Amino acid sequence: MLDVHCHFVPGPTIATLDSFPTVRLGDGAISHAGRTLPLPARLGDADGFAAHIAGLDLAVVSPPPGLYLESLAEERPGYAEQVNDDILAWAPDGVGVLGWLPLWSPAAALAAIERLAGHPKAVGLTMGTTHGAALVDSSYDQVWHALAEAGLALQLHPDSDPYRPDAKGLANASVLGFPSATTAAVVRLLLDGDGFWASGARLCLVHGGGFLALTLPRLLRGVPGKRDVVVERMTRLFADALVFDEPATRLVEATFAPEHVLPGSDWPFPVGLPQLPERDDWRAALAGWSPRAAALLPLTTTRKDRQDG
Protein backbone atom coordinates (compact mmCIF):
# COMPACT_ATOMS: atom_id res chain seq x y z
CA MET A 1 0.00 0.00 0.00
CA LEU A 2 1.05 3.59 -0.64
CA ASP A 3 0.52 6.93 1.03
CA VAL A 4 1.01 9.84 -1.38
CA HIS A 5 -0.21 12.52 1.04
CA CYS A 6 1.43 12.91 4.42
CA HIS A 7 3.32 15.70 6.14
CA PHE A 8 6.29 16.29 8.39
CA VAL A 9 8.19 19.27 9.82
CA PRO A 10 11.79 18.60 10.91
CA GLY A 11 13.09 20.25 14.06
CA PRO A 12 15.55 22.58 12.27
CA THR A 13 12.67 24.13 10.31
CA ILE A 14 10.79 24.95 13.52
CA ALA A 15 13.95 26.40 15.05
CA THR A 16 14.44 28.66 12.04
CA LEU A 17 10.82 29.84 12.10
CA ASP A 18 11.08 30.54 15.82
CA SER A 19 14.04 32.83 15.14
CA PHE A 20 12.11 35.07 12.75
CA PRO A 21 10.67 38.12 14.56
CA THR A 22 7.76 38.39 12.09
CA VAL A 23 6.61 34.79 12.69
CA ARG A 24 4.45 33.71 15.62
CA LEU A 25 4.33 30.06 16.68
CA GLY A 26 1.95 28.73 19.32
CA ASP A 27 -1.37 27.12 20.06
CA GLY A 28 -0.87 24.66 17.21
CA ALA A 29 -0.66 27.40 14.59
CA ILE A 30 1.73 29.67 12.71
CA SER A 31 1.05 33.32 11.89
CA HIS A 32 2.80 35.68 9.51
CA ALA A 33 1.73 38.83 7.67
CA GLY A 34 -1.88 38.54 8.77
CA ARG A 35 -2.25 34.83 7.88
CA THR A 36 -2.72 32.04 10.42
CA LEU A 37 -2.48 28.37 9.43
CA PRO A 38 -2.49 25.13 11.45
CA LEU A 39 0.90 23.81 12.53
CA PRO A 40 0.33 21.28 15.35
CA ALA A 41 3.32 19.90 17.24
CA ARG A 42 2.55 16.35 16.08
CA LEU A 43 3.87 17.32 12.63
CA GLY A 44 7.34 16.80 14.12
CA ASP A 45 6.66 13.39 15.69
CA ALA A 46 9.38 11.26 14.08
CA ASP A 47 8.44 8.13 16.05
CA GLY A 48 4.79 8.53 15.06
CA PHE A 49 5.77 8.91 11.42
CA ALA A 50 7.94 5.80 11.58
CA ALA A 51 5.01 3.84 12.99
CA HIS A 52 2.72 5.20 10.28
CA ILE A 53 4.92 4.09 7.39
CA ALA A 54 5.94 0.74 8.91
CA GLY A 55 3.42 -1.25 6.88
CA LEU A 56 3.66 0.75 3.67
CA ASP A 57 5.57 0.07 0.47
CA LEU A 58 6.16 3.78 0.00
CA ALA A 59 5.17 7.09 1.56
CA VAL A 60 5.39 10.47 -0.16
CA VAL A 61 5.85 13.24 2.39
CA SER A 62 5.66 17.01 1.98
CA PRO A 63 5.87 20.13 4.12
CA PRO A 64 2.40 21.00 5.47
CA PRO A 65 0.49 24.06 4.20
CA GLY A 66 1.39 25.92 7.38
CA LEU A 67 4.86 26.39 5.85
CA TYR A 68 3.64 27.74 2.48
CA LEU A 69 4.36 31.30 3.54
CA GLU A 70 4.93 33.11 0.26
CA SER A 71 5.35 36.48 1.95
CA LEU A 72 8.01 35.04 4.27
CA ALA A 73 9.85 33.47 1.35
CA GLU A 74 9.94 36.87 -0.32
CA GLU A 75 10.94 38.59 2.90
CA ARG A 76 13.59 36.04 3.89
CA PRO A 77 15.78 34.79 1.02
CA GLY A 78 16.68 31.20 1.74
CA TYR A 79 13.50 30.30 3.65
CA ALA A 80 12.01 28.14 0.90
CA GLU A 81 15.36 26.49 0.30
CA GLN A 82 15.69 25.59 3.99
CA VAL A 83 12.17 24.13 4.15
CA ASN A 84 13.07 21.79 1.30
CA ASP A 85 16.63 21.05 2.37
CA ASP A 86 15.48 20.17 5.91
CA ILE A 87 12.82 17.66 4.84
CA LEU A 88 15.13 16.06 2.27
CA ALA A 89 17.87 15.69 4.87
CA TRP A 90 15.42 14.14 7.36
CA ALA A 91 13.54 11.77 5.01
CA PRO A 92 14.18 8.13 5.94
CA ASP A 93 14.56 5.28 3.49
CA GLY A 94 11.34 4.26 1.77
CA VAL A 95 10.09 7.84 1.67
CA GLY A 96 9.84 10.13 -1.34
CA VAL A 97 9.72 13.88 -0.84
CA LEU A 98 7.58 16.57 -2.39
CA GLY A 99 9.34 19.86 -1.79
CA TRP A 100 7.47 23.13 -1.48
CA LEU A 101 7.15 25.15 -4.69
CA PRO A 102 7.19 28.85 -3.79
CA LEU A 103 5.26 30.90 -6.32
CA TRP A 104 5.77 34.49 -5.26
CA SER A 105 7.84 34.83 -8.45
CA PRO A 106 8.67 32.58 -11.42
CA ALA A 107 12.35 32.88 -10.54
CA ALA A 108 11.74 31.55 -7.02
CA ALA A 109 9.81 28.59 -8.42
CA LEU A 110 12.49 27.79 -10.99
CA ALA A 111 15.18 27.91 -8.29
CA ALA A 112 13.25 25.38 -6.18
CA ILE A 113 12.87 23.02 -9.15
CA GLU A 114 16.55 23.24 -10.01
CA ARG A 115 17.51 22.57 -6.38
CA LEU A 116 15.36 19.43 -6.14
CA ALA A 117 15.90 18.04 -9.64
CA GLY A 118 19.08 16.17 -8.82
CA HIS A 119 18.13 14.84 -5.38
CA PRO A 120 17.46 11.09 -5.30
CA LYS A 121 14.61 11.35 -2.77
CA ALA A 122 12.83 14.24 -4.50
CA VAL A 123 9.78 13.00 -6.43
CA GLY A 124 8.10 16.35 -7.05
CA LEU A 125 6.86 19.58 -5.51
CA THR A 126 3.71 20.73 -3.80
CA MET A 127 2.09 24.12 -4.30
CA GLY A 128 -0.54 25.97 -2.30
CA THR A 129 -3.72 27.51 -3.59
CA THR A 130 -2.79 31.00 -2.36
CA HIS A 131 -1.01 31.47 -5.67
CA GLY A 132 -3.21 29.03 -7.58
CA ALA A 133 -3.63 31.64 -10.32
CA ALA A 134 -0.03 30.87 -11.32
CA LEU A 135 -1.40 27.75 -13.02
CA VAL A 136 -3.01 29.94 -15.69
CA ASP A 137 -0.50 32.83 -15.67
CA SER A 138 1.62 32.68 -18.83
CA SER A 139 4.64 34.10 -17.00
CA TYR A 140 4.78 30.78 -15.11
CA ASP A 141 4.69 28.59 -18.22
CA GLN A 142 8.46 28.22 -17.97
CA VAL A 143 7.98 26.81 -14.46
CA TRP A 144 5.66 24.01 -15.59
CA HIS A 145 7.96 23.15 -18.50
CA ALA A 146 10.97 23.00 -16.15
CA LEU A 147 9.02 20.78 -13.77
CA ALA A 148 8.09 18.35 -16.53
CA GLU A 149 11.60 18.32 -18.00
CA ALA A 150 13.02 17.45 -14.58
CA GLY A 151 10.58 14.55 -14.22
CA LEU A 152 9.14 16.06 -11.04
CA ALA A 153 5.45 15.62 -10.24
CA LEU A 154 3.19 18.40 -8.94
CA GLN A 155 0.70 18.31 -6.08
CA LEU A 156 -1.91 21.00 -5.39
CA HIS A 157 -2.63 21.37 -1.67
CA PRO A 158 -5.03 24.01 -0.32
CA ASP A 159 -3.57 26.63 1.98
CA SER A 160 -6.14 29.37 1.44
CA ASP A 161 -9.79 30.01 2.09
CA PRO A 162 -11.42 32.02 -0.72
CA TYR A 163 -14.76 32.42 1.02
CA ARG A 164 -13.45 33.00 4.55
CA PRO A 165 -15.83 30.59 6.27
CA ASP A 166 -14.08 31.38 9.56
CA ALA A 167 -15.71 34.81 9.31
CA LYS A 168 -19.10 33.20 8.78
CA GLY A 169 -19.30 31.10 11.89
CA LEU A 170 -17.61 27.86 10.82
CA ALA A 171 -15.32 26.41 13.44
CA ASN A 172 -12.89 24.83 10.96
CA ALA A 173 -11.91 26.51 7.71
CA SER A 174 -10.71 23.21 6.26
CA VAL A 175 -14.30 21.91 6.14
CA LEU A 176 -15.38 24.32 3.41
CA GLY A 177 -12.62 26.79 2.62
CA PHE A 178 -9.81 24.41 1.70
CA PRO A 179 -11.88 22.20 -0.67
CA SER A 180 -13.34 25.37 -2.19
CA ALA A 181 -9.87 26.74 -2.84
CA THR A 182 -8.81 23.55 -4.62
CA THR A 183 -11.99 23.50 -6.71
CA ALA A 184 -11.67 27.15 -7.74
CA ALA A 185 -8.03 26.73 -8.81
CA VAL A 186 -8.67 23.56 -10.80
CA VAL A 187 -11.81 24.81 -12.56
CA ARG A 188 -9.81 27.80 -13.76
CA LEU A 189 -7.03 25.47 -14.89
CA LEU A 190 -9.45 23.24 -16.80
CA LEU A 191 -10.85 26.24 -18.68
CA ASP A 192 -7.61 28.12 -19.26
CA GLY A 193 -3.98 27.34 -18.53
CA ASP A 194 -2.96 26.34 -22.05
CA GLY A 195 0.69 26.76 -21.14
CA PHE A 196 0.39 24.41 -18.20
CA TRP A 197 -1.28 21.70 -20.26
CA ALA A 198 1.25 22.08 -23.07
CA SER A 199 4.11 21.52 -20.62
CA GLY A 200 3.19 17.91 -19.84
CA ALA A 201 3.31 18.58 -16.08
CA ARG A 202 1.60 15.90 -13.97
CA LEU A 203 -0.78 17.20 -11.29
CA CYS A 204 -2.35 15.40 -8.34
CA LEU A 205 -5.11 17.02 -6.25
CA VAL A 206 -5.38 16.20 -2.56
CA HIS A 207 -8.63 15.58 -0.65
CA GLY A 208 -10.17 13.95 -3.71
CA GLY A 209 -9.92 17.20 -5.66
CA GLY A 210 -12.07 19.24 -3.27
CA PHE A 211 -15.58 19.62 -4.64
CA LEU A 212 -14.52 19.03 -8.25
CA ALA A 213 -16.40 15.72 -8.64
CA LEU A 214 -19.67 17.51 -7.87
CA THR A 215 -18.77 20.68 -9.78
CA LEU A 216 -17.70 19.00 -13.02
CA PRO A 217 -21.17 18.18 -14.43
CA ARG A 218 -22.27 21.77 -13.80
CA LEU A 219 -19.09 23.05 -15.43
CA LEU A 220 -19.61 20.92 -18.54
CA ARG A 221 -23.17 22.17 -18.90
CA GLY A 222 -22.26 25.79 -18.18
CA VAL A 223 -19.45 26.09 -20.74
CA PRO A 224 -20.51 23.78 -23.60
CA GLY A 225 -18.01 25.40 -25.96
CA LYS A 226 -15.16 24.00 -23.86
CA ARG A 227 -16.68 20.65 -23.01
CA ASP A 228 -14.28 18.59 -25.13
CA VAL A 229 -11.26 20.48 -23.81
CA VAL A 230 -12.31 20.02 -20.18
CA VAL A 231 -13.09 16.32 -20.65
CA GLU A 232 -9.68 15.70 -22.22
CA ARG A 233 -7.86 17.62 -19.51
CA MET A 234 -9.66 15.69 -16.79
CA THR A 235 -8.08 12.50 -18.14
CA ARG A 236 -4.68 13.95 -17.25
CA LEU A 237 -5.41 14.79 -13.60
CA PHE A 238 -4.80 12.61 -10.56
CA ALA A 239 -6.32 12.76 -7.08
CA ASP A 240 -5.89 11.13 -3.72
CA ALA A 241 -8.81 9.25 -2.19
CA LEU A 242 -9.00 11.22 1.05
CA VAL A 243 -12.77 11.82 1.01
CA PHE A 244 -13.80 9.95 4.17
CA ASP A 245 -16.41 7.42 3.05
CA GLU A 246 -16.95 4.74 0.43
CA PRO A 247 -19.65 6.46 -1.69
CA ALA A 248 -17.47 9.56 -1.98
CA THR A 249 -14.47 7.42 -2.91
CA ARG A 250 -16.46 5.75 -5.68
CA LEU A 251 -17.48 9.19 -6.99
CA VAL A 252 -13.85 10.33 -7.07
CA GLU A 253 -12.86 7.16 -8.94
CA ALA A 254 -15.65 7.71 -11.46
CA THR A 255 -14.52 11.31 -11.95
CA PHE A 256 -10.76 10.75 -12.32
CA ALA A 257 -10.69 7.04 -13.35
CA PRO A 258 -9.67 4.41 -10.77
CA GLU A 259 -6.08 4.24 -12.02
CA HIS A 260 -5.72 7.97 -11.37
CA VAL A 261 -6.81 7.77 -7.72
CA LEU A 262 -4.08 7.09 -5.15
CA PRO A 263 -4.16 6.48 -1.39
CA GLY A 264 -3.42 9.45 0.88
CA SER A 265 -3.74 9.80 4.65
CA ASP A 266 -2.94 13.47 5.49
CA TRP A 267 -0.82 12.14 8.37
CA PRO A 268 -0.45 13.28 11.15
CA PHE A 269 -3.99 14.60 11.01
CA PRO A 270 -6.24 11.81 12.38
CA VAL A 271 -7.83 10.64 9.14
CA GLY A 272 -6.17 7.37 8.11
CA LEU A 273 -5.67 5.77 4.73
CA PRO A 274 -8.81 5.26 2.62
CA GLN A 275 -9.74 1.74 1.66
CA LEU A 276 -9.00 1.28 -2.02
CA PRO A 277 -8.99 -1.99 -3.94
CA GLU A 278 -5.63 -3.74 -3.69
CA ARG A 279 -3.72 -3.56 -6.97
CA ASP A 280 -1.37 -6.28 -8.14
CA ASP A 281 1.26 -3.61 -8.61
CA TRP A 282 0.91 0.02 -7.53
CA ARG A 283 3.91 0.94 -9.67
CA ALA A 284 1.93 1.52 -12.88
CA ALA A 285 -0.73 3.62 -11.13
CA LEU A 286 1.87 5.72 -9.31
CA ALA A 287 4.10 6.12 -12.36
CA GLY A 288 1.31 7.91 -14.21
CA TRP A 289 1.67 10.78 -11.76
CA SER A 290 5.22 10.46 -10.45
CA PRO A 291 7.70 8.19 -12.24
CA ARG A 292 10.30 9.15 -9.64
CA ALA A 293 8.08 7.95 -6.80
CA ALA A 294 7.30 4.74 -8.65
CA ALA A 295 11.03 4.12 -9.03
CA LEU A 296 11.37 4.16 -5.22
CA LEU A 297 8.90 1.31 -4.79
CA PRO A 298 10.43 -2.02 -3.80
CA LEU A 299 10.52 -4.60 -6.56
CA THR A 300 7.81 -6.62 -4.76
CA THR A 301 4.69 -4.62 -3.93
CA THR A 302 1.84 -7.08 -4.20
CA ARG A 303 -0.17 -8.16 -1.15
CA LYS A 304 0.43 -11.86 -1.89
CA ASP A 305 4.21 -11.45 -2.18
CA ARG A 306 4.35 -9.33 0.99
CA GLN A 307 2.49 -12.08 2.85
CA ASP A 308 4.64 -14.83 1.35
CA GLY A 309 7.77 -12.93 2.29
Image: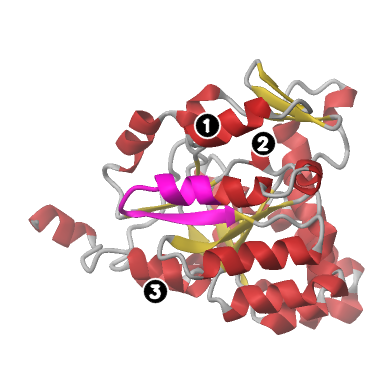
Question: In the image, is residue 87 part of the stretch drawn in magenta?
Answer: yes
Asked if residue 287 can be seen in this view, the reply is yes
Q: What residue type is labelled 1?
A: Phe
Question: Which residue is more in the foreground, 149 or 88?
Answer: 88
Bounds of the magenta segment: 85-99
Q: Report, in whole angstroms, how far the alpha carbon at label 2 lies from the one at label 3.
A: 32 Å
The correct choice, above or below, for 248 with respect to 198 in the image is above
Question: Which residue is more in the foreground, 18 or 104?
Answer: 18
Question: Which residue is more in the foreground, 66 or 220?
Answer: 66
Callout 2–callout 3 Cβ contact below 8 Å: no
Per the image, the residue denoted by label 1 is 269
Question: In the image, is residue 277 part of the stretch drawn in magenta?
Answer: no
Q: Which residue is drawn at 32% across and 37% down?
A: 50
Quadrant, the N terminus: bottom left
Callout 3–callout 1 Cβ contact below 8 Å: no
Crowd class of label 3 (few under 14; some 14 to 19; many from 20; radius 10 Å): some
Q: Pick whichever of labels 3 and 1 is earlier in the sequence.
A: 1
Asked if residue 256 can be seen in this view, the reply is no
Per the image, the residue denoted by label 3 is 284
For discs 1 and 2, the disc positioned in front in the rendered view: 2
Image quarter for residue 217? bottom right
Image quarter for residue 284? bottom left
Q: Pick whichever of labels 2 and 3 is earlier in the sequence.
A: 2
The correct choice, above or below, for 95 with respect to 178 in the image is below
Question: Residue 150, image x and y in percent?
Answer: 56, 76
Per the image, the residue denoted by label 2 is 66
Q: What residue type is labelled 2?
A: Gly
Q: What residue type is labelled 3?
A: Ala
